[in-house]
Image (cartoon, helix red, strand yellow):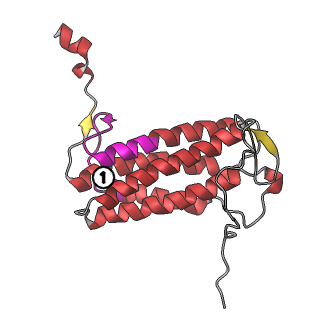
Amino acid sequence: MSEEKTFNDPKLAINRVYTRKGDGGGTRLVGGQKVSKGDLRIESYGTIDELNAFIGAARQTIIDRHDANEGLQGLGQELLRVQHELFNLGSVLATLPEDVVEQMPRVTQVDVDALEASIDRCNEDLAQLRSFVLPGGSRLNADLHIARTVCRRAERLIVRLSEVAEVESDAIAYVNRLSDALFVWSRWASYAEGVEEVLWQPNMASTAKKNA
């Protein structure tokens, strides 16, 4: 007896990459409605797609490190899970509320809880911050910070979308918590790699040095 699945599996047949149907600046939602490619809904799930790509780059940074320890490999698995969750989120964002069905892929409170649990686990290893941090110190740290800033942009767009249209209740909570997780993961990556964090020092600016 097969196990019942929470979400419907994809039903796609992608045979051609180009169709010429979008050459006029339009595209179609999951329900078939034609909208402008500049529509806020398109911008929202398009930015989720961009975020997914940057998280994929961060995961590949871990994969390419042949000396990656068990902790970093575990982080890589979390990033892979997040990539699947982001596709679920993009799927429901690309669908008008009236076309959403019960088993359509989406993010839920379970996904939010998993992010919070990961944040709490990683924070146990980290020293308390005494300053803001700058992206860098390692490639992985920078990759995760790039993903964090794209995640914040996605969050702003989804909030704007929610002000003019109905949005799944857990969507905003998920991207908000994911941006927090990406920040903590960037710090934890430096910890796991044995790399010092780059702390913000206001007096490193050219103006401060000139007046010293």
Residue at x 42% of width, y 48% of height: 182
Could you say where residue 26 lies in the image, as x and y percent from the top left?
Answer: 75, 39
Question: Which region shows up in magenta?
Answer: 122-148
Name the quadrant of the N terminus.
bottom right
Name the quadrant of the C terminus.
top left
Name which residue type carries label 1.
Answer: Ala
Tell me: residue 212, above or below residue 129.
above
Residue at the left extreme of this rendering: 212
Q: In which quarter of the image is residue 63?
A: bottom left
Could you say where residue 12 lies in the image, as x and y percent from the top left?
Answer: 69, 65
Who is closer to the viewer here, 83 or 130?
83
Residue at x 76% of width, y 54% of height: 30
- Residue position for label 1: 189
Tell me: residue 100, above or below residue 162.
below
Residue at x 42% of width, y 41% of height: 146
Q: Does the magenta stretch include residue 137?
A: yes
Could you say where residue 79 lies in the image, as x and y percent from the top left?
Answer: 44, 58
